[in-house]
Each structure stands twice: as C-alpha cells, then as structure tokens.
C-alpha cells in the first residue's frame, strides 16, 4: 500500500508540472515581442573603381636598359653617382637606374675597376680626381701648381666647384687662361709670394714681337689664334660715333639791331654808282 501511495503522489506532481509548463507556453505565445528595425544606413558614396596601371612601357624601358651595351650601363651608373654624391649598394643602383649589377658580371667588374668609381666591398660611390670639399681647399690645391692646373680636372670635385672657381677669379686670387693647344681653361694661382722665373730667351722673344698699332688689328689677330679679346674696339667706336651724332648742333644766335649798331649800305653797291 505504501508503494501505491507514492506512485499516486508522483503522478499528481507530474500533472502539476505539466499544467505549469502549458501555462508558461501559452503566455509566451500571447505576448507580442517588439521587433527591432535597424535604422536606415547612411548613404555612402560608391567606392571608386580600382584602376590597374599598365606597366608595359616601364618594363620595356627596364628591359632596353639591361640589354644596352656595357658602356652605356656603366655611364648610367656613374651619372647617378656623380649627381647624388652618395654611396649605393647594387640593389639600390638597380632601383634607382634599373642597371642590374649583380646579374651582369661585365658591368660589375668594369665599375669596380673604373677610376671614377670607389668600391668599398659593399657600396659604390663617385671618386673625383681631387678630393675637395670647399673653396678653401680648392684655392690651396691651385696654389700647389704654379704652372697651372686644368679646370677639367677640378669640375667634378664637388657640386659648386665652378661657382667657387669663378669667385676666386673675381677676387683676383686665381687666373683662368685658355690653353692654345687644347682650348681648355687653366687655373693659375695669383699669389705674390710665388716667384715665377721666365727664361731670357722668352723675354727677348716677347720684346721682339711687333704689335699692330690699331686695336682692331690686335683683336683680329687674337681671334685668329683662338683667343677671345677682352675689348671690342669696333663696338666702342660705333657707340662713340652714335653719341657724337646724336648731340644737337648749337644754333647760331641772331644778331639783334640795337642803337649802337652801325648801319651801312655796303651790301648795296649799285646805289653808289653815280
């Protein structure tokens, strides 16, 4: 009997639980849950269309450089080193001027042995004939050569060397003269402490040269020998004539008759014939 009572009690508990669950389910179906409506998204501008650049011309340019002669590729690299005055690795040279040194042994060896290129085992840099940095070093070098130094050997020393050379010339510290044979400028020091000895034969030859009396002839002879005259006599004379012709001629002042003026009839001789 005790077992039967426990079973009946368990059935009643199950019925109560079932009733409770049914009520909960019914309440959920009758309750309306608000729906979430997302706010309208702000209008965005359409994304720009992706444009893929056509790299064909660039690749063709790179290919033409790498197929060019060894000398042309070396010149391209030396021009880069000269303009930038920086040290470049082979990879940096390839990026800057498209010359692939690592893949071309002939170019690599030629650059390494070029007198205008310095190679420290890793980087390439430009090497000028004279290691100068400023105007003071330039003047110090020129004074070492009383017989003159070619300007072409100084041009690549540093970027502003030609401006400094002209400044030294303007200040009277150096002379720039043209060589008759090579037509190249030679820089000479203008230092009073330097004693230049001239042979007696050269002095005598200089004294025996008879110069034309007219400066026009002097200038013509200089031009025949490839030298530019410092003067222009023809232009100077033409300017002087223009100035003289442009001056107004002074007008003659008319003589006015006054009480002291003596009047005669000498200009009328026919009045005194009789």
Image (cartoon, grey):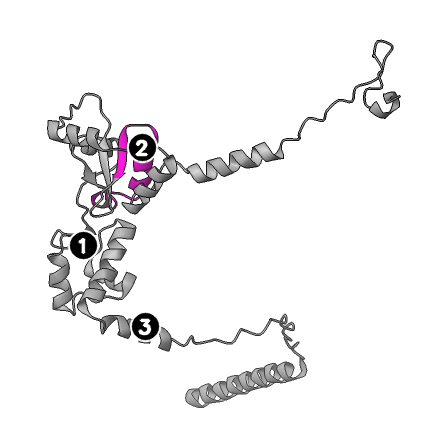
Instruction: Pinpoint residue 11: horizontal percent, then vertical percent.
Output: 50, 88
Is residue 268 in view from this perspective? no
**In front: 243, or 20?**
243
Q: Is residue 212 visible?
A: yes
- Residue 94 percent location from the top left of the image: 24, 64
Point out which mark residue 124 bears: 1
Considering the numbered disc 2 on the image, is that residue within a helix, a strand or a loop?
A: helix
Mark closer to the observer (3, 1): 3
Report if residue 162 lies within the magenta region. yes
Q: Are marks 3 and 1 in contact (CB under 8 Å)?
A: no
**Distance from the alpha carbon under mark 3 to that under mark 2:** 44 Å
Of the numbered discs 3 and 1, the one sitting upstream in the chain is 3
Residues at marks 1 and 2 touching, judged by CB atoms closer than 8 Å:
no
Q: Residue at position x 43%, y 76% from top?
A: 52
Q: Is residue 72 left or right of residue 22?
A: left
60, above or below 120, in the image:
below
Residue 244 in which image quadrant: top right
Q: Secondary structure at mark 3?
A: helix
Which residue in the protein does label 2 denote?
169
Mark 3 — residue? 61
| Quadrant hosting residue 269 | top right
Q: How far apart are the alpha carbons under marks 1 and 2?
A: 34 Å
Q: Earlier in the sequence, mark 1 or mark 2?
A: 1
Q: Earlier in the sequence, mark 3 or mark 2?
A: 3
Region in magenta: 153-177
């Amino acid at each position: 009997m005790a077992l039967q009572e426990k079973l009946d009690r368990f059935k009643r508990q199950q019925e109560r639980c079932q009733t409770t669950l049914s009520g909960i389910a019914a309440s959920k179906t009758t309750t309306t849950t608000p729906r979430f409506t997302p706010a309208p998204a702000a209008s965005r501008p359409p994304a720009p269309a992706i444009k893929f650049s056509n790299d064909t011309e660039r690749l063709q340019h790179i290919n033409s450089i790498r197929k060019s002669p060894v000398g042309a590729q070396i010149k391209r690299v030396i021009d880069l080193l000269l303009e930038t005055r920086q040290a470049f690795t082979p990879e940096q040279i390839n990026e800057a001027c498209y010359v692939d040194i690592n893949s071309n042994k002939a170019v690599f060896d030629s650059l390494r042995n070029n007198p205008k290129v310095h190679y420290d085992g890793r980087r390439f840099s430009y090497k000028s004939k004279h290691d100068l940095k400023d105007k003071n070093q330039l003047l110090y070098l020129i004074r070492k050569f009383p017989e003159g130094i070619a300007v072409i050997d100084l041009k690549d020393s540093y970027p502003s060397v030609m401006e400094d050379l002209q400044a030294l010339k303007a200040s009277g510290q150096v002379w720039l003269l043209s060589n008759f044979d090579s037509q190249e400028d030679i820089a000479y020091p203008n230092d009073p402490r330097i004693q230049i000895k001239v042979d007696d034969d050269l002095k005598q030859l200089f004294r025996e040269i008879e110069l034309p009396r007219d400066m026009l002839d002097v200038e013509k002879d200089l031009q025949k020998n490839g030298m530019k005259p410092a003067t222009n006599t023809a232009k100077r004379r033409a300017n002087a004539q223009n100035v003289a012709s442009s001056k107004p001629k002074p007008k003659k002042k008319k003589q006015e008759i006054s009480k002291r003026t003596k009047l005669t009839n000498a200009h009328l001789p026919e009045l005194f014939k009789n």
